[in-house]
Amino acid sequence: MRGFLKPGDQLPSVRKLAAELAMNPATIVKAYDLLQEELLLVRQQGKGAFIADGNSALRSKASRHKLRELASQLALEGRRVGLDEDQIETLLRAELKKLQPGVKAKKGRSK
């Protein structure tokens, strides 16, 4: 996601990466499995693992999944500190508004 690897780049084989990192190959397999679940890599039988296409719907699905996780964390933390639904929404809307072009963040305290 940070662009260190480009879509289509091939990842090292499990054996090679395990040897380079001095790790158990099963750990590398698990990491590759998780990356595949997050739709960040694709495996091709007999060819290896490759970085998924950055413009694909699959990556979009992974992004939405991550955003749902973050939204859940926001809701839980908001409730933990005693905010109600409207207060949490207000905070989120204020942050979204800051992202709009031409909108400057107001200095001062939050409600």
Image: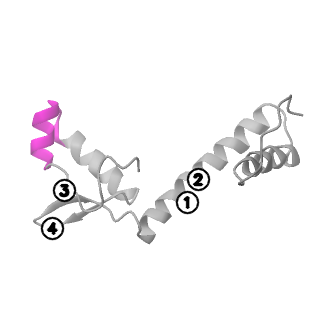
Return the x and y of residue 38 as percentages of the image width and height: 41, 56
Amino acid at pointer 4: Gln
- Residue at the spot of label 4: 45
Amino acid at pointer 2: Leu
Instruction: Tell me which secondary structure the magenta stretch mostly adopts.
Output: helix
- Local packing at callout 4 (Cα closer than 10 Å; few below 14, some 14-19, many 20+) is few
> Mark 2 vs mark 4: which is more N-terminal?
4
- Residue at the spot of label 2: 67
> Under tag 3, what secondary structure?
loop
Q: CA–CA distance between discs 2 and 4?
A: 31 Å
> Mark 3 vs mark 1: which is more N-terminal?
3
Towards the viewer: 9 or 75: 9
Q: Mark 2 touching mark 3, by CB under 8 A?
A: no
The magenta stretch is: 13-25
Amino acid at pointer 3: Gln
Amino acid at pointer 1: Arg
> Mark 4 vs mark 3: which is more N-terminal?
3
Q: CA–CA distance between discs 2 and 1?
A: 5 Å
Q: CA–CA distance between discs 4 and 3?
A: 13 Å
- Residue at the spot of label 1: 64
- Residue at the spot of label 3: 10
Left or right: where 45 falls relative to 96 = left
